[in-house]
Image (tube, grey):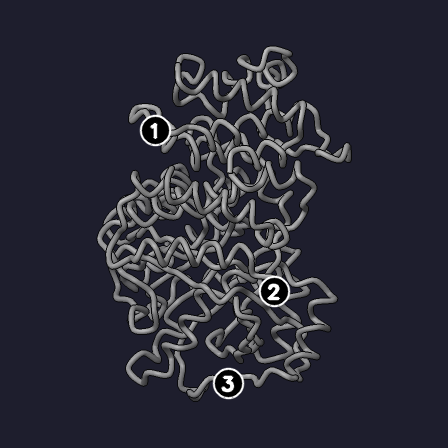
């Protein structure tokens, strides 16, 4: 049965762009555009259309596909109950490709009608060095933009040149709002842009200090990449001929610090939430969603599963994850705002098991060295201090060691490990036959796990058991 496409109910010709968005990818089109598309039906909000800016050569296909469709596209929202809804999105009222028209992007940044610049440029796009937390001024493209400010190639160069013209024209302040999925993304954006601008133009840096705000925001919506066969499938399902469709899960969340220097849309009227401090919301997401993803990833992968939804339809894994949420996390995570924590946890279980937006477990296993310090360790430190039951986390860390050291699952199937930040010291600790050495891994540096008296014997027991019996057999014994 075909899904009926729900179209927007506003006249696009009356919509004026008040937002410039840099990085028009699938997540942006399933998230900020979805909220804004709904908001534009309010006649008082029609100065908040979105002008998209794409800056990369690799954006050519999507740019041309969208241009052919007057920048409209379909978004299929995949229900956890198996029922999908499809929407025609009209909020992307303009689109500029910086490779073809760099001047167009710069002019738009300087435009007085643009009062918010939003970003989805990925975590790596902020050019912050992981170890030091400093902006990398020695990057080749950054160096080019510092030396040739009027012909930029980076996001930083484009925004600096646009702001320089904005300042010269007296076009007023603007908010830069990161919508990337990283902790305190506004602070990261501030660090990156102010570091670049200070190195390029001291006078502009002083103006930025007074005229730009960088709110933090927390974003959440699972949005897979759209492969060629997905395009065929979605068009057949929706009765459409869309060269650039997107699909996503039915859950959506956007929590934003209310710090907009030049005004903002009333996104709260369509489901976003404004707050003075996003920290508690980030803590909840990191401790429940991200930590649970890490918890299920290595044991599931070692047990032979390759897709998250398949693993979560195994009652043993679903019970393991839910117990972790209830017993190991909930006592340490205060519910922010009006959040119903029980409902949030139940929704997470359903989201992980959503067959329509299947995720690869290998993606969850990727770069564990960066994930453990942020998702697992802060809570584990509290658990150790509180003499809590450490069984599930000890099992997770033992499974992680087995995954890194032996690179084979319970059935003997070999796999590759992807740890881009692994150093020689880490490799030595992983290869050691003394399992205690593994607890000195860089991922666990925030505390001395070897000195955690209640943790070490449990972990060693789990390590031996996984080697002898396999990951799933040990999981069953825990349950």
- How far, Cα to Cα, is label 3 from label 2? 22 Å
Q: Quadrant of the N terminus?
A: bottom right
Left or right position of 323 against 88 = left
Which of the pair 98/472 is nearer the observer? 472
Q: Residue at x 41, y 50 (%)?
A: 160
Residue tagged 1: 388
Left or right position of 336 against 3 = left
Which of the pair 169/471 is nearer the observer? 471
- How far, Cα to Cα, is label 2 from label 1? 37 Å
Give coordinates of residue 132: x percent, y percent: 43, 26
Graded by Cα atoms within 10 Å as few (under 14), some (14 to 19) or many (20 or more), the crowding at tag 1 reads few
**Label 3: element kind:** strand
- How far, Cα to Cα, is label 1 from label 3? 52 Å
Residue tagged 2: 356
Which of the two discs, 2 and 1, labels the residue nearer the N terminus?
2
Residue 193 visible (yes or no): no
**Label 1: element kind:** loop
Residue tagged 3: 7
Graded by Cα atoms within 10 Å as few (under 14), some (14 to 19) or many (20 or more), the crowding at tag 3 reads few
Give coordinates of residue 309: x percent, y percent: 60, 54
Graded by Cα atoms within 10 Å as few (under 14), some (14 to 19) or many (20 or more), the crowding at tag 2 reads many
Which of the two discs, 1 and 3, labels the residue nearer the N terminus?
3
Q: Residue at x 56, y 84 (%)?
A: 5
Which of the pair 383/363 is nearer the observer? 383
Give coordinates of residue 10: x percent, y percent: 42, 87
Give coordinates of residue 123: x percent, y percent: 49, 44
């Amino acid at each position: 049965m075909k899904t009926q496409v729900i179209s927007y109910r506003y006249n696009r010709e009356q919509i004026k762009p008040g937002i410039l968005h840099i990085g028009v990818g699938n997540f942006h089109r399933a998230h900020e555009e979805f909220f804004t598309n709904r908001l534009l039906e309010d006649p008082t909000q029609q100065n908040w259309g979105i002008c998209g800016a794409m800056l990369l050569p690799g954006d050519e296909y999507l740019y041309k596909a969208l241009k052919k469709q007057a920048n409209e596209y379909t978004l299929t929202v995949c229900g956890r109950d198996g029922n999908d809804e499809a929407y025609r999105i009209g909020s992307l009222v303009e689109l500029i490709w910086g490779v073809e028209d760099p001047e167009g992007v710069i002019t738009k940044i300087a435009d007085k009608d643009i009062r918010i610049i939003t970003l989805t440029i990925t975590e790596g796009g902020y050019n912050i060095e992981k170890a030091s937390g400093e902006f990398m001024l020695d990057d080749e493209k950054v160096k080019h933009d510092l030396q040739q400010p009027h012909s930029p190639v980076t996001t930083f160069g484009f925004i600096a040149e646009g702001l320089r013209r904005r300042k010269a024209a007296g076009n007023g302040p603007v908010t830069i709002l990161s919508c990337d999925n990283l902790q305190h993304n506004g602070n990261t954006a501030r660090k990156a842009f102010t570091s670049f601008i200070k190195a390029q133009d001291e006078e502009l840096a002083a103006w930025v200090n007074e005229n730009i705000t960088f709110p933090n925001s927390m974003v959440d919506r699972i949005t897979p990449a759209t492969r060629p066969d997905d395009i065929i499938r979605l068009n057949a399902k929706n009765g459409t001929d869309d060269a650039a469709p997107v699909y996503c899960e039915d859950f959506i969340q956007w929590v934003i610090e209310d710090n907009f220097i030049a005004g903002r849309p009333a996104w709260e009227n369509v489901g976003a939430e404004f707050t003075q401090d996003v920290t508690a919301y980030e803590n909840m997401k990191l401790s429940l969603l991200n930590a649970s993803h890490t918890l299920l990833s290595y044991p599931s992968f070692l047990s032979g599963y390759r897709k998250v939804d398949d693993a979560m339809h195994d009652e043993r894994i679903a019970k393991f994850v839910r117990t972790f949420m209830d017993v190991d996390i909930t006592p340490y995570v205060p519910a922010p705002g009006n959040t119903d924590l029980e409902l949030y946890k139940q929704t997470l279980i359903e989201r992980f098991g959503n067959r329509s937006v299947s995720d690869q477990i290998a993606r969850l296993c990727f770069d564990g060295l960066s994930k453990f310090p942020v998702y697992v360790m802060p809570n584990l430190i509290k658990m150790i201090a509180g003499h809590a039951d450490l069984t599930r986390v000890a099992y997770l860390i033992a499974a992680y060691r087995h995954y890194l050291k032996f690179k084979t699952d319970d059935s003997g199937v070999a796999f590759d490990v992807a740890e881009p930040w692994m150093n020689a010291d880490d490799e030595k600790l992983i290869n050691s036959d003394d399992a205690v050495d593994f607890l000195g891994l860089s991922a666990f540096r925030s505390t001395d796990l070897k000195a955690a008296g209640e943790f070490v014997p449990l972990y060693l027991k789990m390590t031996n058991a996984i080697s002898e019996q396999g990951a799933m057999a040990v999981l069953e014994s825990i349950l």
